[in-house]
Amino acid sequence: MTPYPDEDERGISPIVALYSILGFWLFYIGLVTLRSFVMGFEAQGAMAGRRIIVTVIGIVVTWGLYLVIRRFDTATLTKRTLVAFGAAIPCSILIALANYYVFYFYDPAGIFPDLAKEKIHSEQGYALKEIAEFAIGRYFFLSAWAALYLAFSYAAEVRRVERRAARLEKTAQQAELRSLRYQVNPHFLFNTLNSLSSLVMKDRRDEAEQMIMSLSNFYRASLTGDPLEDVPLSEEVQLQKLYLDIEAVRFPDRLRTLIDIPPHVMNCCVPGLILQPLVENAIKYGVSRTSRPVTIAIFAREEDNMLMVSVRNDGDVLPEDHDRGSGIGLANVRDRLSARFGANGRINARTQEGGGFLVELTLPIVRRAC
């Protein structure tokens, strides 16, 4: 089984080809019948019956032409064009022979009273001229249908390529989202384990147990969620509280937290763990680099039908290369917003007057069962 259902499908479907053939020949029989009435030919009923016979034969022959062309649907467009117009030659001759037999060989006097069979056979080259003339007309007729088929076939091929490209793009996007979502700062885990080891060695069992439980809850919540699904802002904030609880054990005298989010935006959907790198950077560059208390604040508001989520710290002035570490910082968040929301997802980071750093996310407001 192929990964994509229509990957092996070529050309156009037989039913579409049949409809196009029937449409062409119905147009032909209607046009010829109209011409017959305009010209005032006699025996209109007999001619209509024979015309139907020729039309049925033409449909069968054109279907055979379709089967021939379809065998080359995997070839280049140039080769398919040469095959189509080349195969139309014998097909037009077959239709011309059938037309000559039905109208001029089988009881011609029944529809042409003034044209006896003996006269047809007595005039040198009469049959060949009639067949050649009709074959040329049918050739252009079949060539027009072949051109239509090639156009349909090429359009169908373009649509298949576009669909597959869209699927591949979606797959790549999902892979990118999963990769970005599962990136975890190794410094966080390393520092947490070091802190845990220090607590155990100092026999601070209660604090060690609290850190272990917080670490367990954090990883259970962060790793079990679908990386392609959004989560309510309330769930994302709760996860960051678990993370801050872990860091509070490491920095009991320096880390302060403030969360100010109106209840009516708590049900807005955001990508899972979208705030994690921001809070992690605030710890790394705001708390760990100073000996004084630092407040990490998380805000959210609704503005112009967009959700604005901010992470701010009031630590010391940050170095210019603060987000050039392991690649999981602002770049991670920026890439995730771009992959998820395109141009509608933005990130704005800036240094605050007097020290500290502010990162503000702007994303569409989505309220659903995320």
Image: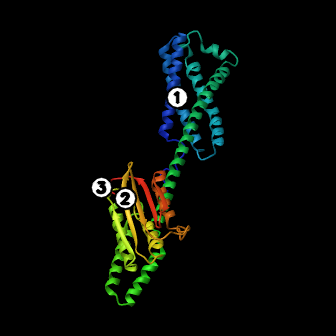
- Give the residue at mark 3: 264
Q: Position of residue 249 (x, y in %)?
A: 37, 79
- Numbered disc total: 3
Along the viewing direction, whichever of 22 and 180 lies nearer the viewer: 180
Q: Nearer the viewer, mark 3 or mark 1?
A: 3
Between discs 1 and 2, the one toward the N terminus: 1
- Out of 314 and 213, give the one closest to the viewer: 314
Alpha-carbon span between mark 1 and mark 2: 64 Å
Q: Residue 12, percent across and down?
A: 52, 41
Kindly identify the amino acid type of the residue bearing the numbered disc 1.
Phe
* Residue at mark 1: 24
Task: Give the SS element for disc 3.
Answer: helix
Q: Residue at x 49, y 51 (%)?
A: 343
Image quadrant of residue 129? top right
Task: Find residue 82 and name its label.
Answer: none
- Image point 37% across, 68% down: which residue? 240
Query: Residue 41: x percent and y percent?
Result: 53, 11
Out of 16 and 366, give the one closest to the viewer: 366
Q: Which mark is residue 300?
A: 2
Q: Are marks 3 and 1 in contact (CB under 8 Å)?
A: no
Q: Secondary structure at mark 2?
A: strand
Label 1 or label 2, whichever lies nearer to me, is: 2
Going by the numbered disc 3, the residue's amino acid type is: His
Task: Estimate how packed mark 2 is, as few (under 14), some (14 to 19) or many (20 or more) residues with alpha carbons within 10 Å.
Answer: many
Asked if 179 appears above or below 212 in the picture, the reply is above
- For marks 2 and 3, the one nearer the N-term is 3
Q: Position of residue 222 (x, y in %)?
A: 38, 69
Q: Name the residue at 54% across, 29% down.
A: 58
User: Does the CB distance between marks 1 and 2 fall below 8 Å?
Assistant: no
Q: Is residue 304 left or right of residue 49?
A: left
